[in-house]
């Protein structure tokens, strides 16, 4: 992956106490190859490498105490700059409703993303209306209706006999009448850029004057996505990009090139097929993800989103009183599961690239098995695991279709986590007494 390649490029720099110009240039040659291989636009790569090299050699990095890390820091900063520095928000119209128009090729993810975005902005307090302007693709209207139903979002359609321009216009009236302050237009796409399609999008734009035109791009298509972006931007003047399928095996090229080629920011990224898998795009976080430094901020946010605060408080109390039992352990596992596949979560931690993950034998199957074992216990056993003797173990194993050694393994894990919590509690006490930080 790109992260691995970049890590490699820097591995020679990291250990060195002193660098010379040649070291930097060599590392940057590797960076250049890695970026090109990740399908980043050639001109973007060339400029990027020049900027970083100039900075690295110019900024007294060579004389600094940790030159290797300094260079990595510069690369990180410049990757961030490449993607636009800060997070770009949706702009709302001063007069309701705000109209957002989706555009993009067929299969890029427009219809799905209409739903995802509507859902995200509804959570932020908006009242979105989804509008079916794709009257060509068979079942496109139905698809949007299904999405709307799943997310409990209203969908406006007029069938496939009315022109997309008229549907868009009528939907604005509908939105005003029903107090929807946000209109999201789902438009048609073609397999390739096509002048008839472009003319239709230009007509819709002229008819409803959308506050934002969001171009939906498939990250998997790499450089092609960037060419599409350039074309759409020249013809339609887009406001931003939503990059989909970033969860797939993308090489990262599109994310890194779009901004510098079009001058338009990526505003959101699609991270999966589920209708909740849309995230705001943060250039700095993406940069550290690309550098393989993990995305700790996203992880923390994800954890906070899924963490049940009440339960956490209760747990804290139990940790202090040392009454943490298998029920609590099960609770914790369930919360972990709510956060999504464990591999996703661990993948966001620094130093956890794919290679490191393979050595780690944690997987979601283990979680499911652990849960099954605990669920096969009686409440008494969960609250007081000490009573679990050999015959109970046999019964528990039988109840969940597993072996006794697996029950033993789980009990050991539980003991370990209890021990860890005890240490944690003691540390906290000490810190409070001493008043010192870390
Ligand atoms: P449209 O033709 O542009 O309207 O594209 P659709 O919304 O119909 O999406 C095409 C396919 O891409 C569907 O199977 C979606 O589930 C899938 N898709 C869309 N966004 C994402 C994403 O972020 N990740 C993944 N893995 N699949 C996505
Ligand atoms: Mg569609």
Image (cartoon, rainbow, N blue to C red):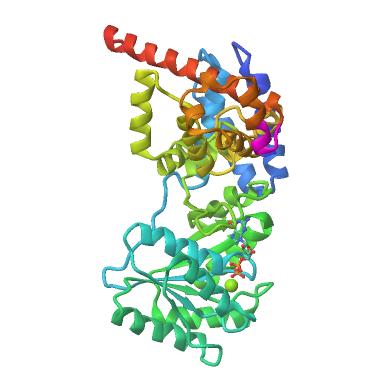
- Spot occupied by residue 304 in the image (x, y as percentages of width and height): 40, 39
* In this view, 350 is above or below 109: above
Kindly indicate the quadrant of the structure image that contains residue 51: top right
- What residue is drawn where x is 50% and y is 56%? 276
* In this view, 303 is above or below 268: above
- Spot occupied by residue 124 in the image (x, y as percentages of width and height): 34, 57
Question: Which image quarter is the N terminus in?
Answer: top right
32 vs 242, left or right, is right
- What residue is drawn where x is 53% and y is 66%? 233
- Spot occupied by residue 73 in the image (x, y as percentages of width and height): 52, 28
What count of labels does the image hold?
0
Outermost residue on the bottom side: it is 161
* In this view, 200 is above or below 35: below
Q: Nearer the viewer, residue 244 or 225?
A: 244
- Magenta stretch in the rendered image: 397-402
The answer to if 260 sits in the magenta stretch is no
Q: Nearer the viewer, residue 87 or 430?
A: 430
Question: Which image quarter is the C terminus in?
Answer: top left
Look at the image and tell me whether residue 168 can be seen.
Answer: yes
Outermost residue on the front side: it is 391
Q: Nearer the viewer, residue 206 or 214?
A: 214
Which quadrant of the figure shows ligand 1? Answer: bottom right
The answer to if 398 sits in the magenta stretch is yes
Assign the magenta stretch its main secondary structure. Answer: helix
- What residue is drawn where x is 66% and y is 50%? 248
Look at the image and tell me whether residue 26 can be seen.
Answer: no
56 vs 321, left or right, is right
- Spot occupied by residue 241 in the image (x, y as percentages of width and height): 51, 59
């Amino acid at each position: 992956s790109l992260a691995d390649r970049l890590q490699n490029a820097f591995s020679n720099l990291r250990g060195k106490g002193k660098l010379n110009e040649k070291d930097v240039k060599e590392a940057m040659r590797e960076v250049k190859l890695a970026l090109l291989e990740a399908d980043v636009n050639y001109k973007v790569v060339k400029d990027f490498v020049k900027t970083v090299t100039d900075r690295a050699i110019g900024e007294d990095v060579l004389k600094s105490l940790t030159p290797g890390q300094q260079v990595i820091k510069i690369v990180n900063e410049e990757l961030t700059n490449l993607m636009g520095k800060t997070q770009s928000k949706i702009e709302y119209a001063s007069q309701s409703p705000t109209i957002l128009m989706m555009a993009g090729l067929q299969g890029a993810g427009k219809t799905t993303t209409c739903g995802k975005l509507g859902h995200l902005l509804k959570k932020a307090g908006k009242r979105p209306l989804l509008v079916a302007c794709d009257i060509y693709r068979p079942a496109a209207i139905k698809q949007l209706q299904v999405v709307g139903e799943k997310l409990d979002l209203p969908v406006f359609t007029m069938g496939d006999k009315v022109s997309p321009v008229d549907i868009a216009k009528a939907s604005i009236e509908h939105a005003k009448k029903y107090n929807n302050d946000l209109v999201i237009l789902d438009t048609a796409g073609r397999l390739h850029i096509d002048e008839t399609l472009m003319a239709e999008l230009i007509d819709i734009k002229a008819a409803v004057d959308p506050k934002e035109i969001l171009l939906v791009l498939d990250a998997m298509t790499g450089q092609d996505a960037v060419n599409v972006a350039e074309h759409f931007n020249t013809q339609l003047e887009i406001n931003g990009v939503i990059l989909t399928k970033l969860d797939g095996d993308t090489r990262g090229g599109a994310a890194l090139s779009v901004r510098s080629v079009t001058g338009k920011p990526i505003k959101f990224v699609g991270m999966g097929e589920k209708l909740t898998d849309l995230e705001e795009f943060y250039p700095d976080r993406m940069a550290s993800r690309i550098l393989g430094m993990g995305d700790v901020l996203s992880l923390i946010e994800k954890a906070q989103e899924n963490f049940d605060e009440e339960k956490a408080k209760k747990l804290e109390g139990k940790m202090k009183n040392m009454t943490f039992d298998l029920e609590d352990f099960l609770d914790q596992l369930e919360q972990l599961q709510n956060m999504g596949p464990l591999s996703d979560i661990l993948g966001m931690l620094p130093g956890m690239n794919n290679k490191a993950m393979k050595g780690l034998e944690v997987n979601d199957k283990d979680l499911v098995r652990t849960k099954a074992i605990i669920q096969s216990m009686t409440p008494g056993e969960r609250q007081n695991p000490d009573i679990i003797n050999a015959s109970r173990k046999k019964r528990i194993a039988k109840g969940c279709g597993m072996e006794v050694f697996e029950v033993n393994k789980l009990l050991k894990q539980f003991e370990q986590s209890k021990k860890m919590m005890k240490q944690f509690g003691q540390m906290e006490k000490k810190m409070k007494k001493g008043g010192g930080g870390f």
